[in-house]
Image (cartoon, rainbow, N blue to C red):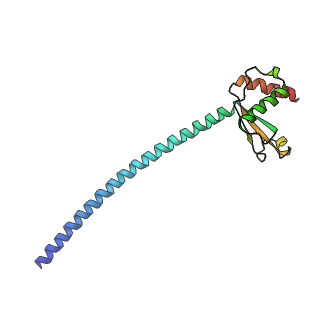
């Protein structure tokens, strides 16, 4: 009976050690989990701020864009910007633009993506073009010219 009791005590000591180690591990994991939750909340907050900043920057860059509908498709890259500049100067008159008139960038939007009723009814081989300008005063003058010549 004495030997059985000593075996039970040894087993109980081993179980106590194992329970102690498990409790220590659980405490460590709980601490890690709390730290991860805190970091996740911090990153979520930072992500929200960065998304707002990105949206603001995108909206500010769009402010200088002008959309033209009905320009023929098929021209790409720098040639599109050059051809667009030539068409604008020819049709609206170079006297309405400064000698430093430049198109910073231009790209076509596929014909399926329409932004107005006029574009929706236009020829499918034509697409909207967006081109960007840096100077707001230049854009304002150009928009006024477009409106005056369009009426």
Question: Farthest residue in the right direction?
Answer: 151
* Among the 4 quarters of the image, the one containing residue 104: top right
Left or right: residue 124 versus residue 131 is right
Q: Position of residue 70 (x, y in %)?
A: 83, 39
Residue visible at 87% across and 27% down in the picture = 149
Height in image: 111 above or below 17?
Answer: above
> Between residues 37 and 151, which one lies in front from this camera angle?
151
* Among the 4 quarters of the image, the one containing residue 84: top right
Residue visible at 78% across and 26% down in the picture = 142
Left or right: residue 52 versus residue 73 is left
Question: Farthest residue in the bottom direction?
Answer: 1
Left or right: residue 90 versus residue 51 is right
Q: Position of residue 113 (x, y in %)?
A: 76, 46
Height in image: 80 above or below 112?
Answer: above
* Among the 4 quarters of the image, the one containing residue 79: top right
Residue visible at 74% across and 26% down in the picture = 139
Height in image: 60 above or below 22?
Answer: above
> Between residues 111 and 115, which one lies in front from this camera angle?
111
Height in image: 40 above or below 8?
Answer: above
Labels in figure, total: 0
Q: Position of residue 107 (x, y in %)?
A: 72, 38
Q: Position of residue 118 (x, y in %)?
A: 84, 41
- Quadrant of the drawing holding the C terminus: top right
Question: Farthest residue in the front direction?
Answer: 79
> Between residues 132 and 42, which one lies in front from this camera angle?
132
- Quadrant of the drawing holding the N terminus: bottom left
């Amino acid at each position: 009976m004495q030997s059985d009791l000593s075996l039970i005590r040894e087993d109980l000591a081993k179980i106590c050690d194992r329970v102690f180690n498990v409790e220590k591990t659980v405490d460590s994991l709980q601490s890690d989990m709390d730290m991860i939750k805190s970091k996740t909340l911090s990153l979520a907050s930072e992500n929200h701020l960065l998304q707002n900043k990105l949206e603001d920057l995108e909206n500010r860059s769009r402010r200088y864009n002008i959309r033209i509908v009905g320009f023929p498709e098929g021209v790409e890259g720098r040639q599109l910007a050059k051809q667009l500049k030539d068409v604008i100067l020819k049709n609206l008159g170079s006297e309405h633009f400064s000698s430093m008139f430049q198109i910073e960038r231009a790209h076509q939007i596929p014909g399926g993506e329409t932004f107005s009723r006029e574009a929706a009814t236009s020829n499918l081989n034509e697409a909207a073009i967006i081109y960007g300008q840096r100077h707001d005063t230049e854009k304002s003058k150009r928009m006024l010219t477009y409106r005056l010549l369009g009426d």
